[in-house]
Amino acid sequence: MKYAIIFPGQGAQRPGMGKDVCERYISAKRIFDEADEALGFSLSDIIFNGTPEKLALTEITQPAILTVSIAIFRALEQELGTAVEPACMAGHSLGEYTALVASGALSLADGVRLVHKRGRLMQDAVPLGMGSMAAIIGMELPDVSAICAEAACGEVCQAANVNSPTQIVISGHAGAVMRAVQLIEQKYTAKVVPLRVSAPFHCDLMRPVGDQLRNAFRALEWHEPKFPIIANATAREVQKIPAVRDALYTQTFSPVMWSQSVLEMEKRGMEGYIELGPGSVLSGLVRKICKGKRPCAVSNSEELTAAADYLRGAKND
């Protein structure tokens, strides 16, 4: 059976995530220990015992979700007693970095340090309150893009996440996003949900972050990923190291083309999707994009056992 492994992005975090997997699987505990050592502070203590507010800090959230997702990935391999071999991998924003760690393109230590830096740079790029984001539910991308262009008035207002054909997040200067929301409410019946975020991600305001990250990439040791990675910015496969780094640079200030990425995986004949990490947001989006697909979300040890049984059954079919 051809299946894809997908990794969640920021927003999926919750205190205690991954704790039961860490307690049950030695391979998972090693990942938490390695992340703590790489960062020089106890990330695992913040994940397991910290407050929601502490965990929601972007520079903490990003390495925390990556660590939990990789711990679950390694625990799944321990449960199966063999390497997991998906036909491809993808992740939503931060999750793309997780996919690269899982595929061997980056070490865990480099991965957590890199997204810790990424989170801090994204947080500091725009003064608090100057930017905002909002989810638009019930409109398609061409209409949302037209509204953003009309609302910009010299400021930044762009589609940031194309999560499904009719669920699109916009990002930019707070005033421009507010104008876009007002225009949508005047012209459409779409639902608008303001997002509680600390910065306007995946828009031109993040270009300086991309430049700084590109410099950081040069200091790291890269390997070609073992599995094809479907990149956020293009919804196309990247596997050569220069293409991987370019994709990460571009996604910093470009929309996450998640809907298009899932359709690309569908073209490749994916029969199943396994989401590894906290929450099940991506599984829900896959169900909206691909009618009839039933993704397997794995965020705890019970779901991990079920996923292992699923993969064993698929292998025997």
Image (cartoon, rainbow, N blue to C red):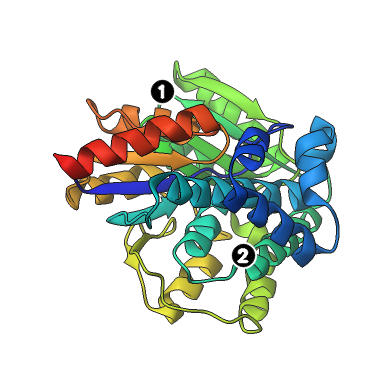
Q: Position of residue 16 (x, y in %)?
A: 72, 32
Q: Residue 167 location, x and y as percent? A: 44, 31
**Left or right of 283, for residue 203:** right
Q: Residue at x 61, y 76 (%)?
A: 214
Left/right of residue 312 with respect to residue 63 in the rendered view: left
Instruction: Identify the residue shown where x is 52% and y is 43%.
Output: 8
Residue 231 location, quadrant: bottom left
* Mark in front: 1 vs 2: 2
Few, some or many C-alpha atoms within 10 Å of disc 2 (few <14, some 14-19, many ≥20)?
many
**Mark 1 or mark 2, which has the lower sequence index?**
2
Using a 10 Å C-alpha cutoff, classify the residue at mark 1 as few (fewer than 14 neighbours), some (14 to 19) or many (20 or more).
some
Counting from the top left corner in percent of width and height, residue 118 is at: 70, 61
Farthest residue toward the top? 189
Residue 233 quadrant: bottom left
Q: Nearer the viewer, residue 315 or 35?
A: 315
Instruction: Identify whether 223 is placed above or below 269.
Output: below
Task: Report the front residue among 15 and 202.
Answer: 15
Residue found at x 54% / y 41%? 277
> Residue at the spot x=64%, y=51% of the render?
67
Q: Tell me the distance, in whole angstroms, between the alpha carbons under discs 1 and 2.
A: 38 Å
Tag 1 residue: 138
Depicted 101 relative to depicted 47: above or below: below
Q: Measuring from the top left, give residue 206's x and y in whole percent.
A: 66, 59
Toward the left, the furthest residue is 317
State the SS at label 2: helix
Q: Nearer the viewer, residue 78 or 8?
A: 78
Q: Amino acid at mark 2?
A: Leu
Callout 1: SS: loop
Q: Amino acid at mark 1?
A: Gly
Q: Circle 2 sits on which residue? A: 108
